[in-house]
Amino acid sequence: MSRSTDGTDGTDSTDGTDSTGGRDGTDSAGTGDDSTSTRTRTDGIEDLLRLHAPQVLGALVRRYGHFDPAEDAVQEALIAAAAQWPEDGAPENPRGWLIRVASRRLTDRLRSDEARRRREERAAALTPADAFVAPPPGESPTGPGGRAPSEDDTLTLLFLCCHPALSPAAQIALTLRAVGGLTTAEIARAHLVPEATMAQRISRAKRAVRGTEFRPPEPGDRDRRLAAVLQVLYLIFNEGYTATSGPALHRTDLAREAIRLTRAVRRLLPHEGRVSGLLALMVLTEARAPARTGPDGELVPLDEQDRSLWDRTAIAEGTALAEEALAGGPAGDYQLQAAIAALHDEAGRAEDTDWPQILALYELLVHRSPDPAAALGRAVAVAMVHGPRAGLAEVDALAGALEGHYRLDAVRAHLLERAGESEAAGVAYRAAADGTLSEPEARYLRTRAARLNP
């Protein structure tokens, strides 16, 4: 469930960006404009670098065993590529080029002084037999025995970045830096903190995983670790789709990065229902993004949105993903939330929404998970099926679990307004506005309160 007040029902879930998970296509080729052609070429190179960055980092971490300096070396190689490739063109083997350059930078770094030489010796002693060896120019990047760095390294790197020793905030920051390829400054801006603060957070995270062997988790631990990876991707998307603080409602870069990374995980685990369900949830939610704000950036609730603006291509993709995820086995949290999002997206008008089916899905979701946010979404579904008074009773029952959370006040205000209790609804809207750090949400909630109690 999203933290958004879209509809104040908790059903505008945290699920997706556009159907491509990437740029919006406005700088398309073929216009005959040299500057447009240059932008298109630069965008393509940037996408190429983001695709290969985690694989290159994985190859270096496996070979040298030092996450922090390896990550720095990869960043240097990416900078070099960003400077050279737009002019010279991308090499035939971009990943091999990046690995060679990053390996040389890392080797130079390790040899720069006595301390680094000691780390190089320890890394050499710990190097596994199948360690990757950077190939000479023109050869494919394979190690002894023919093993090549691949997207498997992306998943292994995600497991490392989401190590249980790290806090959720550290997991998110390290994932965006090491796997997403965002700079420290970009991550800091997205979280509205100083760059120095974010740099310290990332450095602490790197120190915490230092010495961790670069390999997938053991089979017995895999499900738990994968759940942590998906939760981090879900949190990144949540923060992108509905920013918890600041002047912007939607941080497109974070939402799209979460979708891109989830797509990468799904390519590696195509039959894992949780992954397909999460991707469906993201895509279906982000499909509604074009209608979430008005001309002046004001929040537009779900039941008032112009549904002709919704991305129908994304909705078709998300619905197919949700159906596939549900057909693959027992329905988990992400699959159920995706199914709820699909029912919202398939309704041509707000009054066409299949609320009884949504309530049935919420019943399953709440039965599976004690998440109070899911219970709040169920309370809204109860109100839409059985009336606002029934929904208010459910909201009151959640007061202990969600005490002081603005979403509880926002939903209570919405249901009080539907029940005709304008004065009480206005008070609840103001309480919700005082509780959120999101400026667009606060403005929306205060506007609702003022309309009821001028």
Image (cartoon, grey):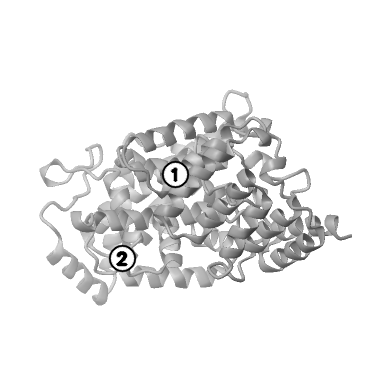
Q: Position of residue 348 (x, y in %)?
A: 64, 30
Q: Residues within 10 Å of mark 1 (few under 14, many from 20)?
A: many
Q: Which mark is residue 157?
A: none
Residue displayed at 63% across by 49% down: 383
Q: Position of residue 41 (x, y in %)?
A: 51, 35
Q: Position of residue 62 (x, y in %)?
A: 22, 56
Label 1 residue SS: helix
Q: Nearer the viewer, residue 159 or 100?
A: 159
Residue displayed at 43% across by 52% down: 180
Q: Nearer the viewer, residue 319 or 372?
A: 372
Label 2 residue SS: helix
Quadrant location, the C terminus:
bottom right
Q: From the viewer's perspective, is 414 left or right of 75?
A: right
The residue most toward the right is 454
State if disc 1 and disc 2 touch (CB < 8 Å). Answer: no
Identify residue for label 1. Answer: 336
- Please determine whether, in this image, residue 443 is positioned above or below residue 146: below
Residue displayed at 31% across by 39% down: 329
Q: Position of residue 431 (x, y in %)?
A: 72, 67
Identify residue for label 2. Answer: 109
Q: From the viewer's perspective, is 196 left or right of 154?
A: right
Quadrant housing residue 159? bottom left
Q: From the viewer's perspective, is 347 left or right of 413?
A: left
Q: How far apart are labels 2 and 1 at the CA level?
A: 49 Å
- Name the amino acid, label 1: Leu
Disc nearest the viewer among 2 and 1:
1
Q: From the viewer's perspective, is 446 left or right of 216?
A: right
Q: Nearer the viewer, residue 260 or 424?
A: 424
Residue 79 visible, this angle: no
Q: Residues within 10 Å of mark 2 (few under 14, many from 20)?
A: some
